[in-house]
Image (cartoon, rainbow, N blue to C red):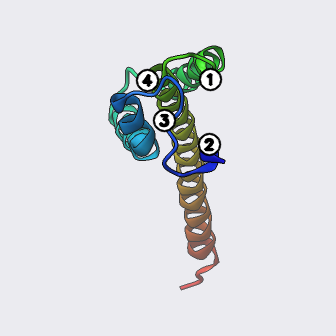
Amino acid sequence: MLSESPHAVDRGSSRAGLWLHERRTRLALWIAAAESLVVLFSHELTKWTVIALAVVSVLAWLGGRESRSQIVRQILWIFAASQLLAVIGVILAWIVKWAVIMAVVIFAVLGLVYLFVDRR
């Protein structure tokens, strides 16, 4: 009955581990946002780097999620979540990029049609 209490403390938890647990979603979102900006403005870091880091982070999380240290579990969770969010950002950026390219092509074709159809 005590383990279901919202104030129950996990075995092996520490003050730093609890702090990370309370803020892990926010930290993962900020890390993913910062990484997405770095990828956006950097020619060195590509979408493939982000995808490779996501694979490494998920493997690390799978390997360490049963760790006795709550700090290790929380850091690995934040690492995996932030990298997977960054992958989503990269994919959305790729979709938006191609949508913009398609819009430019469509407008160019419509402009050419208008020029060739205009009989003045």
Identify the disc placed on residue 93: none
Under mark 2, the amino acid is Ser
The structure residue drawn at horizontal position 52% and vertical position 43%, both measured from the top left corner, is 8
Report, in whole angstroms, how far the alpha carbon at label 4 lies from the one at label 3. Answer: 16 Å
Identify the disc placed on residue 3: 2
Name the mark nearer the viewer: 1 or 4: 4
Q: Which callout, 3 or 1, points at the residue further toward the start of the chain?
A: 1
Secondary structure state at the residue bearing disc 2 = helix
Secondary structure state at the residue bearing disc 1 = helix
Disc 4 and disc 3 in contact, CB within 8 angstroms: no
Label 1 belongs to which residue?
A: 58
The structure residue drawn at horizontal position 53% and vertical position 39%, both measured from the top left corner, is 90
Label 3 belongs to which residue?
A: 82
The structure residue drawn at horizontal position 37% and vertical position 43%, both measured from the top left corner, is 30
Name the mark nearer the viewer: 2 or 3: 2
Depth check, front residue: 104 or 43? 43
Q: Residues within 10 Å of mark 3 (few under 14, many from 20)?
A: many
Q: Which callout, 1 or 4, points at the residue further toward the start of the chain?
A: 1
Under mark 4, the amino acid is Ile
Residue 29 visible in the picture: no
